[in-house]
Image (cartoon, rainbow, N blue to C red):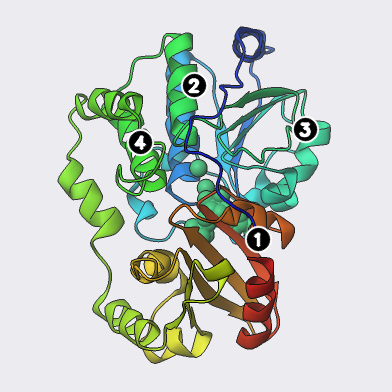
Amino acid sequence: MSTARPVEAPARLITEADWSAALAALRDLPPDPTVLLVCHVNPDGDALGSMLGCGLGLVAYGVPVQATFPAPYGLAPPFDQLPGQELLIDPATAPVAPDLLICFDAASASRLGELADRLDTAGATIVVDHHASNTRFGGIHLVDPGAAATSVVVDGLLDRLGVPLDERIAECLYVALSTDTGSFKFDLTTPAVHELAARLLATGLRPAEISRRLFDSRPFGAMKLYGDVLARATLEPGAAGGRGLVWSYATLTDLDRHGQERHVLEGLIDAVRVAEEADVACVLKQVGTTEWTVSLRSKGGVDVGAVAVGLGGGGHRLAAGFTAYGSVDEVLAVIRSSL
Ligand code: AMP
Ligand code: MN
Ligand code: MN
């Protein structure tokens, strides 16, 4: 079992040389450059918001960009209202050898799916991320594990480029920041995070509307589905070395029964992790007959990021995930023994 490290901001790992290299890569592009932005598969608010916000900023800077992410391609609620979607292209049509590749919120090359091959063919690569587990898989690294979201690093980049925040860039970065801080509730919600939020809001954003869309709104059928999943939740006080585990699962049949699509399950872990008797929360979301997407959360006692990495996934100390194969019982047995 992994025990928590003391709560402290990890060392900032972006050096002045890193920033200079990133600025030079953007300044020294050939005429009419091909610049491809990519973010991790099954993108969340931070992946999409950071990528599109940076993309809009780079266009304002004078660099044309295209943005994409690995298949399955397409935006579902609540991200289908993000500004900057005019920059998006289908990954099947993404340039094969861009002059510059910029990767967002991906801790490793594998998170880029079929687009990972561009790491070898691109003229230069900038990795923009905040995962402590980042494998530094590019050429230039803007990776800050002390940043609450990748969008914090994007703000630093746009600031150094001299690109002012407008309302569309700000909405993207705000969606990213509020997603990864759980609406300004998680560990890394520092004074600097609130200062960034203040600068974003000052562009004219409507935070109530954005927050409702992100956190407080789902179809009635999804609400009923959440009820079913919560009804079958299991509490194991002795698991995770006595710290306690609460878990549940959602099947494809559950989605069918309530006429819902997969994306409505993204918030399920937040409904399960409230159980105060358990430090660790786990939700299995069925993808295929024996394939599951697993979400793990800890309240501080267990490094679930290390657990997820050990099981082929990744994430942060208190929020992580991986893909698992087998029956619910088999997957749970593996998780229990890893905790
Ligand atoms: P989720 O439970 O899907 O919200 O994921 C929580 C966090 O875990 C994400 O922000 C990612 O950093 C990470 N994560 C989730 N799934 C994977 C995976 N299959 N591989 C690597 N990292 C993952
Ligand atoms: Mn992410
Ligand atoms: Mn992130």
Quadrant for the N terminus in the image: bottom right
- How many C-alpha atoms fall within 10 Å of the one at disc 4: few (<14), some, or many (≥20)? some
- How many angstroms separate mark 1 from mark 2 (CA)? 44 Å
Q: Are marks 2 and 4 in contact (CB under 8 Å)?
A: no
Amino acid at dot 2:
Leu
Quick one: 277 or 211, which is closer to the camera? 277
Q: Which residue is mark 4?
A: 189
Q: Which mark is residue 58?
A: 2
- How many angstroms separate mark 4 from mark 3 (CA)? 38 Å
Q: Is mark 2 within 8 Å of ligand 3?
A: no
Q: Earlier in the sequence, mark 4 or mark 1?
A: 1
Residue 324 visible in this rendered orientation of the protein: yes
Q: Earlier in the sequence, mark 2 or mark 4?
A: 2
- How many C-alpha atoms fall within 10 Å of the one at disc 1: few (<14), some, or many (≥20)? some
Q: Is residue 115 above or below residue 328?
A: above
Kind of element beneath mark 3: loop
Q: Which mark is residue 1?
A: 1
Q: Is residue 289 above or below residue 174?
A: below
Q: Position of residue 258 (x, y in %)?
A: 36, 87
Q: Is mark 4 within 8 Å of ligand 3?
A: no
Q: Position of residue 293 (x, y in %)?
A: 59, 69
Q: Is residue 216 above or below residue 227?
A: above
Q: Residue at x 67, y 38 (%)?
A: 134
Observer-side mark, 4 or 3, equals 4
Q: Which residue is mark 3?
A: 97
Observer-side mark, 1 or 2, equals 1
Quick one: 144 or 188, which is closer to the camera? 188
Q: Earlier in the sequence, mark 3 or mark 1?
A: 1
Q: Is residue 23 left or right of residue 205?
A: right
